[in-house]
Amino acid sequence: MKSPVQTMVGAIFIPVKDIIKAKEWYCDLLNIETPNEIITDHLFVIDLDYDLKVVLDSKIYEKRIIDDVPLFHFNTSNIETAYKYVQLKGIEVLTAIQHHHFFNIRDLDGNVLMICEC
């Protein structure tokens, strides 16, 4: 039987404490303005390239497990410029650029994200 599960990720859920502050932080990081509204008082969907979405969810915040491992990575075409950009934004940078390829940051809620030159 062929698997009905597709080899494509549709959305990544990120637990956040304050949906409004998280919305502002992620939109600022990505330098996007989005017409999307907060759904049912706890969800905010950010449309990314290739039909991928990031879903900020304040309802699952209490269920999260804090870890030092990145949940996922955002791509960049220039790791040095991206590193300077997040520093200028005052974002918590957890690592220096590793192997000239990636570094980790922390969002407002302690979630670890990676920025990676791919």
Image (tube, rainbow, N blue to C red):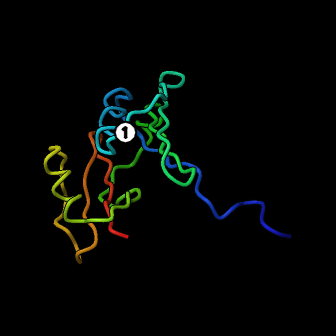
Q: Residue at x 28, y 72 (%)?
A: 101
Q: Is residue 7 above or below residue 12?
A: below
Tell me: 116 left or right of 63: left
Total count of labels: 1
Q: Quadrant of the C terminus?
A: bottom left
Q: Return the residue found at the far right.
A: 1
For residue 113, side relative to residue 82 (left or right): right
Task: Provide residue 35's location: percent of width, then percent of height.
Answer: 47, 28
| Residue at the bottom extreme, as displayed | 99
The amino acid pointed to by label 1 is Ile
Residue annotated with mark 1: 32
Residue at the spot 13% in from the left edge and 47% down from the top edge:
88
Quadrant in which residue 76 is drawn: bottom left
Q: Position of residue 15 (x, y in %)?
A: 42, 40
Under circle 1, the secondary element is: loop
Q: Nearer the viewer, residue 29 or 112?
A: 29
Determine the residue positioned at 32% across, 60% down: 114
Frontmost residue, 61 versus 14: 14
Instruction: Establish if 40 lies above or below 5.
Output: above
Residue located 27% across and 65% down the image: 78
Left/right of residue 3 with respect to residue 8 in the rendered view: right
Give how far across and how far down residue 54 sits, in percent: 47, 45
Q: Position of residue 29 (x, y in %)?
A: 29, 44
Looking at the figure, which quarter contains the N terminus? bottom right
Question: Closer to the camera, 72 or 100?
Answer: 100
Q: In which image quadrant can residue 105 be found? A: bottom left
Q: Is residue 28 above or below residue 52?
A: above
**Local crowd size for mark 1, using a 10 Å CA cut-off: few (<14), some (14–19), many (≥20):** few
In front here: 87 or 81? 81
Left or right: residue 50 versus residue 91 is: right
